[in-house]
Image (cartoon, rainbow, N blue to C red):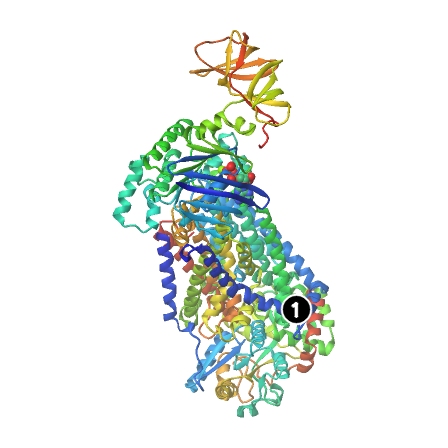
C-alpha cells in the first residue's frame, strides 16, 4: 500500500525549473529519502507534498486521496492534509512553551482537554522532553528545539511524516544520536517518512529506499544497497560514497560483457552498459580495490590515513590517483611500491558526471 | 474539492479587496477622473496648466527635494536614536523612547507654530541668542526651505525611529555576535552587519517620512509663505481657493505620481525579501551593546536632543496656553489659567475630545486589522493580486488630506450610502488616510516572521483564522501595537479631513483647535492642544503600567 | 491569547461609544425645525449668536458648520458635484463669493422686513444677500516695534515699512482679496510692485498677520479690526490706524441657499441677524453693526464716522482669476 504517490510532478518558479517530472512513491512503514546536492529541488518536492507550494504540473496522492492534480484543479490546502512536518530551522513558536508548541495540532482540532493532556505526555515522553514542558524555546538548545518540532509533527498521528533536513543544524554527535532515535521512532510508530537530506551517509544509513536528485530531476530510486552498488550514472556513483573514476578504453564487447584497457595497458572485463566504443570511464569503490605486495597494476602509496577499522590510502598508478580502503590486517608504508587489483567495477560510457 | 477544504485565504483576500475598494479606490477614483474634466468633457487642460505655469512645476520640484532632504535626515536621526534606544545599555532609554515619540502627537501646524515661537525672528531661542550675542537677529531663518525641512524632520523622524526600533528589537542577536566573534569592532558591526540587516526597515521608514512630508500641508503653509516657497500641497490649496477643482485634482495626481515613483523604487530595493527575515524559528536571546566610556556622553547628547525636539516645543505650547496673549512679556502678570478654564467649560471642546477619541480608537483598530490582513496576503500568503492590493492600500498616504476629504464627499454623500453629516464619513476618511500607515508598519513586522513559523501551523492543521490568531498576530504584536499607536496619535489630532467633513456635533479636536486658532484664540487653542498632549502622555503611562511595558512607548 | 482579548475588548469599547454619542446619528430634519448654517465667522461668535437666536425661537434649531472660507468654498464645490449645496444658510466674510453664487442661481431671494434699516450699499437690491456684520481692513501697529507716531497713516505709506510690514494672502482669504481688488481698481498694481520691492511679507491670513504682529515679528500689519481689538483687549501693545484713504469695510453677507429644505426657519434666522436685537447682540461681541440705529462697540468708530473705500464687487468677481494670477506673479514668485 503506497502512502505517498507523486506522479510527474513539475514545479517551475518564474525562471527556475525546481522540480521536473518527478515520480515516486512511499510505501507503508517506509523510510524514503530524497538525496541530492543543495538546490536540486528536494525541498521543493517535499513542500509540494506538504501543500506549501502549488505544483506547476502533476499529481500527488497521500494515502487514498488525491491532494494535488493540475488536470483536475485540485490543491488541498496544507492544513487539511494528514501530514506532520519538521522544518530545517525547527520553526518552533517562540511565544509558546514547549507544551503549547507540541499540543498545538490537537488544540486546533479541538480535542477534549484530557485527551490532549494524555497525548501530550506520550509525545513529550517519546522525544524525552517531559522535564522541559514549561520552558520557552529560547531556553532550549538546538537539539531540544528539534525534538519539540518532532513531537509537534507526530502528536496529531499523521499518515505521513515529512522532514526537511531536520538534523543539519545539529552537531555531529547529536546528529548521530537523533538518527537512531528517528529510525527507532519510525519502527515503533510505523509511520511512513519522506526525508530530505543532502547528506548521503544519513540517507544510506536511515532509508529503506531513496531517490537521488540532481538539477530538479530524480536520477535513481532504489534501496541504499542498490544505489551504492549499482548507480545508474556517474553522477549517482560520484555523489554516493567514495568512488574512483579511471579513464579507460573499450576494446571489445561480447555477450553483455566489455573488455576495457586502463592504467597503462591493464585489461579488465566488466558488465557492458552499451554505448559507443572508445573512451569511457571505469568506476571502482575504494573497498573494491585490493592492495598487496603483488598485483597486476603497479602503484605507489602516496598518503595514508588510519581510520580505525579501515586504512585509507592514496595510491598513484600510471599517474592516476586512486583511493583504496583496506582492512587494518595488513599495513603498508608511505612510499612503498605495491600492486593493486580491481575486483569490482562499473563501466560508464558517457562523459564524466553528466546528468544521466 | 469540498467547500470545507477551500483555501480560506482567497475569501479573506476578497473581503479585504472589497474593503480597499470601498474605502480607497472608489473615493479616489471619484476625484481622479475629475482632473480630466473641463465643463463635463474630457480634457487635459488642467495638466497643461500644471506644466505651463512655473508656480506649479516649481512646486513639484520643491516638493520632491524638500521631501528627499527630510527623508534623508529622518533616516539618519531615526536610525541612530533607534539603535541607542534599543540595542545599547544607555541609561533611561525607556523614558527616552516615550519622549521621542511625543512630538508626533502634536498637530503639524501646531508643531510649526511651536517652532516659530522658539526659532522665529522673535522666538524665545532667537531672543535668547540675541541677548547673548548682542546681535540684531538670529543667524537662522525658520521661514525658509531649510526651516521647513527641519520642522518636517522633527515631525516625521519618529516614523523611521519606530520602524527601525521594531526591526532591531526582533533582530537575531547572534548575527551581531557572530561578527563580534569574527573580530569586528562595534562600529564595524553596526556598519556592516546591523545596518544592512535593518536597511529595509530604514528604507520603509524613510519612505513613510518622504511621502509624509510630500503630503504635509501645515508646515510648508506656515513656514513657506514668507519665503515665497511653495510646494504641491500649498498649490493644491490655492487651486481649491480659486476654486479650480480640476486643477486641484490634477496637482494632487502629480503628488500621487511622485509618491508612486518613490514607492516603486523602494519596492525595487527590497526585492528578495527572504534575505531579511530575522525572526527565525530558532529562538535566540536578545543582547545589549555595552557603550562603556561613550555611555555618558551619548546619554547627554541624546538627552539634549530629545529635550530640544520633544520637550521644548511642548513647553512652548504650554507657555502660550498660560500667557494672556502670545507675545506678552514673560512676567508674572502675563500668566493666567483662564484659557484652560475656558476650554474646560466649552461643551463643544468636551464633545470634540470624545468624538476624536472614538474616531481615533476605531480607525486605529480597523486599519491595524486591515493592515495585518493585507500585509499577510502579500508577505506571507503571497497570493496573486495581493501585491496590487498592498499597493492600492498605500496610495492614500500620498494624497493630500483635503483631497481625501473631497473624495469622501463625492463618494459617500449620495444615497444609497449617504454618510455625509455623520461621524461615519469622518471614520471612513480616516480609514483611507491611515490604512497606509497600518499596512506599512505591519508589512515590515510580518516580513520579519519567518515563513516556516506559519507553515508549521498549517502542517499542524491550523486553519487561516487559527494561524492568524495563534501564531502571526502574537508574533507581530509589538509591531502591531506600534502601528496602532502610529495611527491613533495622528488621528486624535487630525484636522484637514475633519474640517471638511464634520457637521453639527461631530466636531473633532483638530477642528476645534483650528477654529479657535483661526478666530485669534491662539492661547485657547494651545490650551486644548496641551490638554490633549497631557491625555496622551498619561494614557501612554497607564498603558505601559498595565501591560508591564509591553505596549505603549 | 492575551492579544486577541485586548483587541476584542477595544473593539467592544469602541462599538459602545456611539450609544453615548448623539453626533453619530445624522440629525433628521423635523419639518420646520432645523436649519444648517455654513459660516466663517469666529466659532464662538457663531455659537453664541446661534444660541441667542434659539432663545427667541425655541422651535428652530440652528446647526452650525464653522470653517475658514477656503474650506467652505471647497466643501461647497464638492457638494455641488453630488447633488447640490447642503447648507440652508451661508454667512461668510468673502463677499465676492455671493456674486458668484448669485450668478449660478444658487441663492434664494429674500427681502427681510428688517432689511429696510440696512444701507443700500450693504445689501443686494434683489434680496439675494444682505450684510450681517461689518469687518474692516485696517492698519494695525505694534507700538513696541514701531512707535505710533512713525506708523503710516495711509495705505499709500504702508509699503514703505518694507520688511516690518505684513499682509494676508488674497489667494487664501476673501477679505484680503477684496482689499486687493479695491487697490487695483483704483491705482493699478503699482502699490504691490512697491510692496514687493521693499519686502513686505505675505502670510496666510488675517489672524496669522495679527498674531505675528503681536509676537513682534512685524511692526505693522494689514489685517481685520476685530482681531486686533481682541488682542488689544487681552493687553497686547497694538493700535489701530484708520487709513487716510479710507478703510475697506468688507460686509459679511448672509444668504439663503436656494435648495433649502426649511425656508421658514432660514428666513427667521436672517431676520434675527438683521434685527435690532440681533445686531445689538453682535455689538456685545465686539462686532461692528450694519444698522445705523445700533451703536458700535465702545471705543470703535461707528460706520458713519469711518471713511470707506468703495468696493467694486462685480468687477472683482468678473476678474477674480486675473487678479489672483497677477498678484501671484508680483508678490509670490
Ligand atoms: N520561492 C522560490 N522562488 C524562486 N526559486 C526558488 C524558490 N524556492 C526554491 N527555488 C529554486 O528552486 C531550486 C530548488 O530549491 P530547493 O528545493 O530549495 O533545493 P534543495 O534541494 O536545496 O532543497 C533552487 O534553484 C532554488 O533557487
Ligand atoms: Mg532544502
**Farthest-out residue, front:** A255
Decide which of A279, C155 is in the foreground and name it: A279
- Which element type, helix, strand or loop, lies under badge 1? helix
Q: In which quarter of the image is residue B58?
A: bottom right
Give the residue displayed 50% in from the left and 41% down from the top: A44
**Farthest-out residue, left:** A114
Is the residue A249 above or below the residue B190 in the image?
above
Decide which of A58, B23 is in the foreground and name it: A58
Q: Can residue B398 be seen in this view?
A: yes
Residue A348 % position (x, y): 58, 25
The residue labelled by disc 1 is: B36
Q: Can residue B121 be seen in this view?
A: no
Could you tell whether B405 is left or right of B492 in the image? right
**How many numbered circles are shown?**
1
Q: In which quarter of the image is residue C12?
A: bottom left
In the rendered structure, the residue with mark 1 lies on which chain? B
Residue C150 % position (x, y): 65, 69
Is the residue A78 above or below the residue C103 in the image?
above
Residue C111 % position (x, y): 56, 91
Is disc 1 surrounded by few (<14), some (14 to 19) or many (20+) residues within 10 Å? many
Quadrant occupied by the C terminus of chain C: bottom right
Give the residue displayed 42% in from the left and 33% down from the top: A167
Does the beta carbon at disc 1 come under 8 Å from ligand 1?
no
Residue B18 % position (x, y): 49, 63
Amino acid at each position: 500500500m503506497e502512502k505517498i504517490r507523486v506522479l510527474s510532478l513539475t514545479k517551475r518558479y518564474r525562471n527556475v525549473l525546481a522540480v521536473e517530472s518527478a515520480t515516486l512513491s512511499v510505501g507503508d512503514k517506509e523510510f524514503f529519502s530524497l538525496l541530492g546536492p543543495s538546490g536540486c529541488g528536494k525541498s521543493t518536492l517535499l513542500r509540494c507534498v506538504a501543500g506549501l507550494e502549488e505544483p506547476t504540473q502533476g499529481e500527488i496522492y497521500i494515502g487514498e486521496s488525491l491532494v494535488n492534480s493540475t488536470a483536475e484543479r485540485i490543491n488541498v490546502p496544507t492544513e487539511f492534509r494528514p501530514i506532520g512536518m519538521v522544518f530545517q530551522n525547527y520553526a518552533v513558536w517562540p511565544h509558546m512553551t514547549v507544551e503549547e508548541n507540541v499540543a498545538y495540532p490537537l488544540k486546533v482540532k479541538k480535542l477534549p482537554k484530557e485527551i490532549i493532556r494524555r497525548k501530550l505526555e506520550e509525545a513529550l515522553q517519546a522525544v524525552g522532553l517531559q522535564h522541559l514542558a514549561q520552558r520557552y524555546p529560547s531556553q532550549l538548545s538546538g537539539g531540544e528545539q528539534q525534538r519539540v518540532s518532532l513531537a509537534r509533527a507526530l502528536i496529531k498521528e499523521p499518515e505521513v511524516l515529512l522532514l526537511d533536513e531536520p538534523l543539519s543544524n545539529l552537531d555531529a554527535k547529536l546528529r548521530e544520536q537523533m538518527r537512531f532515535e528517528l529510525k527507532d521512532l519510525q519502527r515503533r510508530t510505523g509511520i511512513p517518512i519522506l526525508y530530505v537530506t543532502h547528506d548521503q551517509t544519513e540517507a544510506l544509513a536511515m532509508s529503506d529506499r531513496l531517490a537521488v536528485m540532481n538539477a530538479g530531476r530524480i536520477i535513481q530510486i532504489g534501496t541504499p544497497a542498490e544505489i551504492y552498488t549499482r548507480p545508474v550514472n556517474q553522477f549517482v556513483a560520484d555523489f554516493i560514497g567514495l568512488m574512483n573514476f579511471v579513464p579507460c578504453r573499450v576494446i571489445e564487447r561480447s555477450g553483455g560483457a566489455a573488455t576495457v584497457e586502463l592504467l597503462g595497458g591493464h585489461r579488465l572485463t566488466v558488465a557492458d552498459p552499451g554505448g559507443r566504443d572508445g573512451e569511457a570511464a571505469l568506476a571502482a569503490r575504494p573497498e573494491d580495490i585490493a592492495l598487496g605486495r603483488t598485483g597486476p597494476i603497479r602503484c605507489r602509496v602516496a598518503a595514508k590515513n588510519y581510520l580505525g577499522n579501515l586504512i585509507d590510502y592514496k595510491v598513484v598508478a600510471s599517474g592516476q590517483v586512486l583511493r583504496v580502503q583496506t582492512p587494518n590486517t595488513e599495513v603498508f608504508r608511505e612510499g612503498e611500491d605495491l600492486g593493486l587489483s580491481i575486483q569490482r567495477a562499473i563501466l560508464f560510457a558517457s562523459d564524466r558526471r553528466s546528468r544521466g | 474539492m469540498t467547500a470545507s477544504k477551500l483555501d480560506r485565504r482567497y475569501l479573506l483576500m476578497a473581503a479585504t479587496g472589497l474593503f480597499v475598494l470601498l474605502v480607497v479606490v472608489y473615493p479616489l477614483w471619484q476625484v481622479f477622473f475629475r482632473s480630466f474634466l473641463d465643463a463635463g468633457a474630457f480634457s487635459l487642460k488642467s495638466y497643461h496648466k500644471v506644466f505651463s505655469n512655473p508656480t506649479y512645476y516649481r512646486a513639484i520640484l520643491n516638493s520632491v527635494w524638500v521631501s528627499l532632504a527630510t527623508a534623508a535626515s529622518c533616516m539618519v536621526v531615526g536610525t541612530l536614536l533607534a539603535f541607542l534606544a534599543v540595542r545599547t545599555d544607555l541609561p533611561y532609554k525607556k523614558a527616552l523612547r516615550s519622549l521621542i515619540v511625543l512630538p508626533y502627537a502634536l498637530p503639524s501646524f501646531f508643531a510649526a507654530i511651536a517652532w516659530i515661537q522658539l526659532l522665529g525672528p522673535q522666538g524665545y531661542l532667537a531672543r535668547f541668542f540675541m541677548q547673548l550675542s548682542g546681535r540684531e537677529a538670529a543667524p537662522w531663518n525658520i521661514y525658509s526651505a531649510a526651516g521647513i525641512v527641519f520642522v518636517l524632520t522633527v515631525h516625521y523622524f519618529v516614523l523611521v525611529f519606530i520602524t527601525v526600533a521594531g526591526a532591531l528589537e526582533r533582530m537575531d542577536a547572534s548575527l551581531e555576535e557572530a561578527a563580534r566573534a569574527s573580530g569586528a569592532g562595534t562600529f564595524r558591526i553596526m556598519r556592516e552587519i546591523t545596518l544592512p540587516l535593518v536597511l529595509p526597515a530604514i528604507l520603509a521608514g524613510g519612505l513613510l517620512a518622504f511621502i509624509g512630508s510630500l503630503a504635509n500641508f501645515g508646515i510648508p503653509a506656515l513656514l513657506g509663505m514668507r519665503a515665497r516657497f511653495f510646494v504641491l500641497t500649498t498649490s493644491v490649496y490655492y487651486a481649491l481657493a480659486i476654486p479650480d477643482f480640476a486643477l486641484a485634482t490634477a496637482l494632487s495626481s502629480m503628488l500621487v505620481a511622485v509618491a508612486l515613483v518613490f514607492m516603486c523604487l523602494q519596492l525595487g530595493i527590497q526585492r528578495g525579501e527572504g534575505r531579511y527575515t530575522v525572526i527565525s524559528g530558532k529562538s535566540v536571546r536578545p543582547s545589549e551593546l555595552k557603550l562603556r566610556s561613550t555611555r555618558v556622553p551619548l546619554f547627554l547628547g541624546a538627552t539634549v536632543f530629545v529635550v530640544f525636539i520633544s520637550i521644548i516645543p511642548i513647553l512652548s505650547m504650554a507657555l502660550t496656553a498660560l500667557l494672556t496673549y502670545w507675545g506678552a512679556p514673560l512676567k508674572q502678570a502675563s500668566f493666567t489659567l483662564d484659557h484652560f478654564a475656558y476650554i474646560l467649560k466649552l461643551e463643544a471642546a468636551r464633545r470634540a475630545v470624545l468624538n476624536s477619541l472614538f474616531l481615533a480608537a476605531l480607525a486605529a483598530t480597523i486599519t491595524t486589522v486591515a493592515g495585518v490582513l493585507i500585509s499577510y496576503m502579500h508577505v506571507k500568503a503571497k497570493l496573486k493580486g495581493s501585491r496590487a492590493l498592498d499597493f492600492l492600500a498605500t496610495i492614500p498616504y500620498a494624497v493630500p488630506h483635503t483631497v481625501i476629504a473631497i473624495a469622501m464627499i463625492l463618494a459617500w454623500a449620495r444615497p444609497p450610502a449617504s454618510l455625509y453629516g455623520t461621524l461615519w464619513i469622518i471614520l471612513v476618511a480616516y480609514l483611507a488616510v491611515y490604512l497606509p500607515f497600518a499596512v506599512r508598519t505591519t508589512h515590515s513586522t510580518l516580513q520579519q516572521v519567518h515563513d516556516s513559523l506559519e507553515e508549521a501551523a498549517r502542517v499542524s492543521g491550523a486553519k487561516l483564522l487559527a494561524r492568524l490568531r495563534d501564531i502571526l498576530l502574537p508574533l507581530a504584536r509589538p509591531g502591531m501595537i506600534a502601528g496602532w499607536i502610529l495611527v491613533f496619535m495622528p488621528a486624535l489630532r487630525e484636522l484637514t479631513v475633519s474640517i471638511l467633513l464634520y457637521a453639527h456635533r461631530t466636531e473633532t479636536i483638530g477642528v476645534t483647535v483650528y477654529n479657535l486658532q483661526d478666530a485669534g484664540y491662539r492661547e485657547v487653542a494651545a490650551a486644548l492642544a496641551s490638554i490633549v498632549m497631557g491625555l496622551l502622555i498619561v494614557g501612554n503611562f497607564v498603558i505601559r503600567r498595565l501591560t508591564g511595558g509591553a505596549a505603549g512607548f | 491569547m492575551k492579544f486577541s482579548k485586548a483587541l476584542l475588548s477595544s473593539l467592544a469599547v469602541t462599538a459602545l461609544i456611539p450609544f453615548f454619542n448623539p453626533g453619530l446619528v445624522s440629525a433628521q430634519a423635523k419639518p420646520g425645525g432645523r436649519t444648517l448654517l455654513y459660516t466663517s465667522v469666529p466659532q464662538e461668535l457663531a455659537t453664541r449668536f446661534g444660541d441667542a437666536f434659539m432663545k427667541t425661537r425655541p422651535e428652530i434649531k440652528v446647526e452650525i458648520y464653522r470653517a475658514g472660507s477656503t474650506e467652505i468654498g471647497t466643501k461647497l464645490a464638492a457638494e455641488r458635484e453630488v447633488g447640490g449645496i447642503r447648507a440652508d444658510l451661508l454667512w461668510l466674510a468673502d463677499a465676492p463669493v455671493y456674486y458668484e453664487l448669485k450668478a449660478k442661481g444658487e441663492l434664494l431671494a429674500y427681502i427681510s422686513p428688517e432689511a429696510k434699516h440696512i444701507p443700500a450699499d450693504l445689501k443686494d437690491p434683489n434680496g439675494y444677500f444682505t450684510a450681517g456684520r461689518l469687518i474692516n481692513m485696517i492698519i494695525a501697529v505694534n507700538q513696541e516695534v514701531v512707535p505710533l507716531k512713525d506708523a503710516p497713516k495711509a495705505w499709500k505709506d504702508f509699503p514703505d515699512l518694507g520688511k516690518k510690514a505684513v499682509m494676508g494672502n488674497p489667494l487664501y482669504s476673501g477679505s484680503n482679496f477684496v482689499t486687493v481688488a479695491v487697490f487695483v481698481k483704483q491705482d493699478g498694481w503699482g502699490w504691490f510692485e512697491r510692496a514687493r520691492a521693499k519686502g513686505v511679507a505675505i502670510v496666510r491670513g488675517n489672524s496669522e498677520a495679527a498674531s505675528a504682529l503681536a509676537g513682534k515679528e512685524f511692526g505693522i500689519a494689514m489685517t481685520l479690526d476685530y482681531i486686533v481689538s481682541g488682542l488689544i483687549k487681552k493687553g497686547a501693545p497694538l493700535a489701530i490706524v484708520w487709513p487716510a484713504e479710507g478703510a475697506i469695510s468688507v460686509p459679511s453677507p448672509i444668504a439663503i441657499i436656494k435648495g433649502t429644505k426649511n425656508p421658514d426657519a432660514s428666513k427667521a434666522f436672517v431676520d434675527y441677524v438683521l434685527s435690532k436685537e440681533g445686531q445689538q447682540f453682535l455689538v456685545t461681541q465686539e462686532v461692528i453693526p450694519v444698522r445705523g440705529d445700533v451703536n458700535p462697540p465702545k471705543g470703535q468708530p461707528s460706520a458713519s464716522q469711518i471713511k470707506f473705500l468703495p468696493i467694486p464687487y462685480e468687477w472683482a468677481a468678473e476678474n477674480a482669476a486675473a487678479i489672483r494670477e497677477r498678484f501671484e506673479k508680483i508678490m509670490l514668485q
